[in-house]
Image (spheres, rainbow, N blue to C red):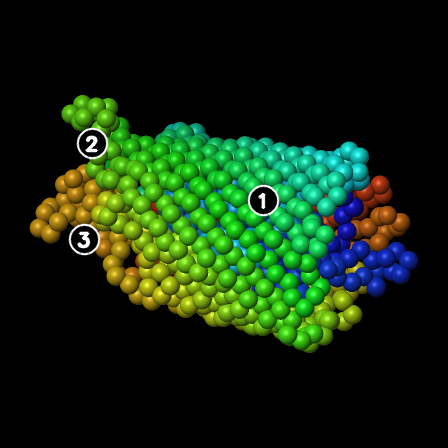
Amino acid sequence: MKAKTVARYTSVLAFCGVSWTLHAQNADQTQGAAEAKLEEITITSQRRVENLQDVPIAATALSGDQLEGKAVVRLSDLQFASPALSVTDAGLTQSVNIRGIGLASGSPAVANGVATYVDGLFQPPIVSTNRFYDIAGVEVLRGPQGTLVGSNSTGGAIFINTQNPILSQFGGYGEVSAGNYNEATAQGAVNLPVGDTFAFRAAGDYVSRESFYNSVGPAYTDAGGLQERSGRLGLLWKPGAFQALGKIEYTNRNTGGYAYRPIPGTQYAPFAPAGHFELSYDTPEENHERALLSEVELRYELPNQLTLRSLTGYQDKNIDNVYDTDATAAASTVNPQRVEDQHVRERVWTEELNIISPTGGRYNWITGAYVQHNKIDVDILQTSAGFPTNITNPQNKTTTGWFGQVNYKITDKLELQTGLRYSTFDVDGVGAVIIGRGIPGFPSGGRQVANLSGSHRDDRPTGKVAVNYKLDEENLLYAFVARGYKPGGFNSSTSQFDPETVWDYEAGWKGTLLNGHLRTQLGGFFNRYDDFQFGVTDLTTGSNGVENLPSATIKGFEAQVQAQLGGWGVDAGAAYVDSSLASAGPFVNTRLVPPGTLGPQCPPGVASSPPVCFDYGPYLQVQASGPNLYSPKWTFNAGVDYRFRLGESISLTPRLNYAYVGSQFASLSYSYLTDYLPSRGLLSALVTLQLPHSWYVEGYGTNLANKTYVSGQFGNNEFFGAPRQYGVRLGTHF
């Protein structure tokens, strides 16, 4: 791996909404820093290596060095480096949304709306949140990707690509760091070629950190701390036209539990301790995640340059959680100790086949088939005052897709792009809510109060039609219409919800100016969003469920600019998203419902008698019109760095970043007290001293102003973003 250069610090910033990415090139020592230009940005999300400036999509692409320069350590940090993207904490899942479209429910029945891939493997909603390490690059594609990605991409897609083994090149890197909150990290990789046709690459990462929170309750907790270990092995064999690439990765992550506090205005807020970073639990918490990812990609190039590709993957993710569900200890005098013990396991098998044509002629194309099978196990034990409630909800899901895309050059400057995909989805499962297991007076196995079994099937065509016009080699104009789709599902045998669909109308311009020193992207979009899936209380069972909401319209613009001028690297960008969700019928405002409520809605005239039934009438609320959930109107990020040459092979590069994510709502109540996530503007900095023999020393700081902000919600509790962090790194490349 090469020594770190200015490229690590020039990254992506969206100004007004289409994503542009800054890759600064190392200045040629013989010509001087004034000749440094932007490096070409390439993406691989369309199964080929392509110049981002030639691809008619709104996208952000960041190299591994750029991620570090922008203080992007894990998936949630991408919202500070890519426009129109928001990632909010939601306990078991992360709500990843692009342009206000993605995931607004923690139910295992709901699929992603922003498809996340690691080395080409689709990730379920319980995405592993481990740190990035030995990363080749990350690509954030905005808008529905209905052809090559297919279902689960109504908002867009994120591709995380790790480094592949490299033939005939020994190398690697190592890095250690120390920071406040007793943080200690170590990561590294080694690439070892064996002959001319075989190579393997091993990489690992370790991080240990104390919690940002103080435990002041009767039960000590280190919730919010971090102990994480991850390792990856890659093997590459390329004897000629054939190539086999295999990777396997394992992550073990323990946070000591989720660190959250009651949302102001909810029933347990008065019992919470005064400080934002103080926890008062009466139950020791646990959050333990294990993830195994494995894959094999096979490629064979035929004599006519057609490429045959196969990608086979298997993933196994396990999460064990113990919650203090009311997040308080004093509240136990009113509502005795409330605990939830949760186990979730998801196994995913995937297979994709492609035939990829060569490029360079009048037309090129790609075709493929895809199948994915998910097996989900959910076991939950809720205990209040010693009374148990068991919830089980195993499900099996199968997704298929057949797709093709053709790009045809009508003239040397005008190109027509068409893509079509047909997707199917099939899910079935059994499940129940059972109370009183092991309690005298109840059946030995407990009493079933809700049946969560059911099945659902749907299918949709999706695709894209685009017209691309090259003004010259440096400027591209494009316009397209695309459709995206996210499958539906079931809440019970008598309650289902429909798929989501979105129509996207978009136009943009990508340009490279000033002889390669300046790069821009600019675009606008209009979305018609139908059957938005939102997590609610299902009145047929009284359990968590999903329902479809009315249509929404989403419009806005995005832009990004990047420049490399002498020793200066600058990037700036933003996105403006204006969304409108129509009013709808009543829903249960769970912020108001008393704890321990069980049972379906009582028939008219029947009084509440949990767990037989419960009258939710007093807690029903009509949804008013408002913006899409998790949809900040403005997102903005900017960065600047300057490289000082201190001598041969020695340089000093300070970098400063600012990121802004606008306010957003997390519930249809649209309450500024209980559902509102205020905006936040965060400042980070990095100073890198590049030394001879590829050594470097870095000082870093994030959230330098030490701002306190809400990063998400889970039930009636809320999470806070990380406070100020700082430290020093020492590393080398070889």
Disc 3 or 1, which lies upstream in sequence? 1
> Distance between the Cα atoms at labels 2 and 3?
25 Å
The C terminus - image quarter:
top right
> Distance between the Cα atoms at labels 3 and 1?
51 Å
Q: Position of residue 415 (x, y in %)?
A: 63, 72
Between marks 2 and 3 in the image, the one whose residue lies nearer the viewer: 2
Q: Position of residue 414 (x, y in %)?
A: 64, 75
Q: In terms of depth relative to the viewer, which is nearer, 31 or 331?
A: 31
Residue marked by disc 3: 617
Residue that extends furthest to the left in the rendered view of this protein: 605
Residue marked by disc 2: 447
Residue density around tag 2, few if under 14, some if 14–19, many if 20 or more, within 10 Å = some
Between marks 1 and 2 in the image, the one whose residue lies nearer the viewer: 1
**SS at mark 1 in the image:** strand
> Residue 270 occupies which quadrant of the picture?
top left
| Residue 218 sits above or below residue 272 on the image | above
Residue marked by disc 1: 311
Disc 2 or 3, which lies upstream in sequence? 2
